[in-house]
Amino acid sequence: MLTGMALLSSDRLVVAERYSHSVRLVNVVQDEVLHQLEVDSQPWSLCSLPGNRAAVALPFNYTILILDCDNQLSIVNRITVREELQELGYSNGHLIVLYGIGKIEKLHMNGAVVRQTNLETSSLHIYQPLSVMTEGNVTSIYVGDYDNRRILRLDKNLQVQQVYPLKGDNVPWSVLAVGENQLLVSDRNVSLWQLDSTMGRWTRLKKIDVDSMAFCHNRHVLYCGVNDAVKRYAIS
């Protein structure tokens, strides 16, 4: 199960494989696995960092791994958090960390807490996906609220700015911000949706069971973790 992925460049992708306890560096142009790193426990979320690095969440170890991703994967730092983290994002020198209980934190890269907020989400279901989009000085943080069937948009201060209810009985499983006011959301009804957050308009794109996503703006390609494979789709 590919629980997380992050694009490092137009040809390199880093992927978290939950049940094999590993992270892989993949050349998506040549369809080649460049390196595989075994980690201490199940990896979940991933996000890319400046300097060809990535951060990986190990929820059951209460740990964030910072990886160097040049020609092979290597651990350069470990950050310990106080609770079981779930999702990771990055924005302007800070990590955005979402916990299964609905708490979200902004951290310095040394692990010091800058700000935290308790979201008004149910803690009955642990899975609440996260995506962070930064354009210039504007940061938008999107959180999928599984139990309440909605998407929350937060600002850089972790304050909720807008709420987008999902259509019908859909629940969010993976979210990915792909541009200003544009969000991709997969649901547990095996559908991929596009949300125009300006209009609040949902468009169903494809019937597919997606666990994680990454988007290459240069090539207009969406990479999806589907079971144990990475699949590519052209997105206009």
Image (spheres, grey):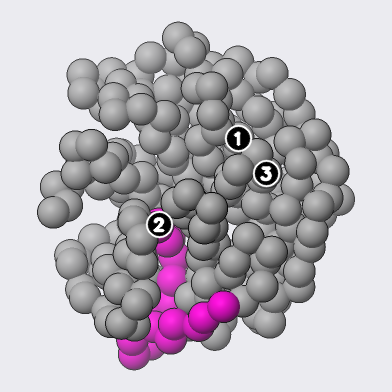
Q: Position of residue 146 (x, y in %)?
A: 53, 75
Q: Which residue is found at the position 41% from the left and 29% from the top?
A: 8
* Number of residues whose C-alpha sits closer than 10 Å to that of mark 2, classed few (under 14), some (14–19) or many (20 or more): many
Name the outermost residue toward the bottom: 168
Disc with the residue nearer the chain's start (3 vs 1) = 1
The number of numbered badges drawn on the structure is 3
What is the quadrant of the N terminus in the image?
top left
Q: Is residue 227 visible?
A: no
Where does the magenta region start and end? 161-177
Whether residue 53 is situated above or below residue 195 in the rendered picture: above
CA gap between label 1 and label 2 equals: 17 Å
Residue at the spot of label 2: 176
Q: In the rendering, which numbered label is found on residue 94?
A: 3
Residue at the spot of label 1: 55
Q: Position of residue 15 (x, y in %)?
A: 44, 34
Q: Which residue is found at the position 35% from the left and 19% from the top?
A: 33
**Residue 169 magenta-drawn?**
yes
- In the image, 133 versus 60, the foreground residue is 133
Identified by mark 1, the residue type is: Ala
Identified by mark 3, the residue type is: His
CA gap between label 3 and label 2 equals: 18 Å
Disc with the residue nearer the chain's start (1 vs 2) = 1
Please state if 14 lies on the left or on the right of 99 as rendered. left
